[in-house]
Amino acid sequence: MYKSGTEFLKRFFKVSTIYKYGFNWSPMYRRTTAKLIDVSDDLHYVKIRLQLNWKNRNYAGSIFGGSMLAATDPIYMIQLIQILGDDYVVWDKAVEARYKKPAKSTIFGEFIFTEDEIEGIKQKVEAHRETDIVKTMNLVDEKKNIIATFNKTLYIADKLFYKEKLKKRKTNN
């Protein structure tokens, strides 16, 4: 549903606009209580804001760790799907969360891919047909104090290779 909607909306809006408002209006992302506040036209940069409120306040009065994790969870994967295009498969594989201090105010996170990273991913996939990468991002408060760090492992594969890999799994089961 999301992918077909995005394809339709590309006729009228920039991909970055669809990405930003698609996330912010999507029920699955709205429940995190976070908002995308900045998305670059090439999707290499995304910034989120997560405000402390009654929906995400934990027993101790700070932002619930699950809200922080959920707010960061889908960004890199969907960002990379859009950047790489239809010849690639991208999946979230793992995440390591480290909570450094309580979030007692609004926090922010930035998700960044450089041109060199994208080119490196494409080269690894071309050479090995699949690869894993680890992206690290921090949630910070207004004073840039690190509140939480997330190490996100993403799986990227050549789409044709991935389809063949799935067929082999099905025949072996």
Image: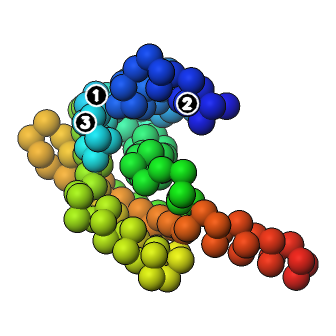
Type of the residue with mark 2: Glu
Q: Position of residue 131 (x, y in %)?
A: 48, 75
Distance of mark 3 from mark 2, alpha carbons? 19 Å
> Is 106 rendered above or below residue 89?
above
Label 3's element?
loop
Q: Are marks 3 and 2 in contact (CB under 8 Å)?
A: no
Say left or right for 100 vs 76: left
Q: Amino acid at mark 3?
A: Ser
Q: Which mark sits nearer the N-terminus, 2 or 1?
A: 2
Mark 2 Cα shell of 10 Å, populated few (<14), some (14-19), many (≥20): few
> What residue is at 80 percent from the left and 76 percent from the top?
169
- Disc number placed over residue 62 in the picture, else none: none
Q: Nearer the viewer, residue 49 or 119?
A: 119
The one nearer the camera, 168 or 98, is 168
Mark 2 or mark 1: which is in front? Answer: 2
Cα separation between marks 1 and 3: 10 Å
Q: Is residue 125 above or below residue 48?
A: below
Seen at 23% across and 57% down, the residue is 114
Whether pointer 1 and pointer 3 mark residues with C-beta atoms closer than 8 Å, the reply is no
Q: Secondary structure at mark 2?
A: helix
Per the image, the residue denoted by label 1 is 37
Classify 10 Å Cα crowding around label 3: few (below 14), some (14-19), many (20 and above). Answer: some
| Neighbours of disc 1 within 10 Å: few (<14), some (14-19), many (20+) | few
Q: Looking at the rendering, which quadrant does residue 36 occupy?
A: top left
The percent position of residue 14, horizontal first and vertical second, equals 36, 26
* Residue 99 seen in the figure: yes
Provide the residue designation for mark 3: 40
Q: Which residue is mark 2?
A: 7
Residue at left 53%, top 29%?
6
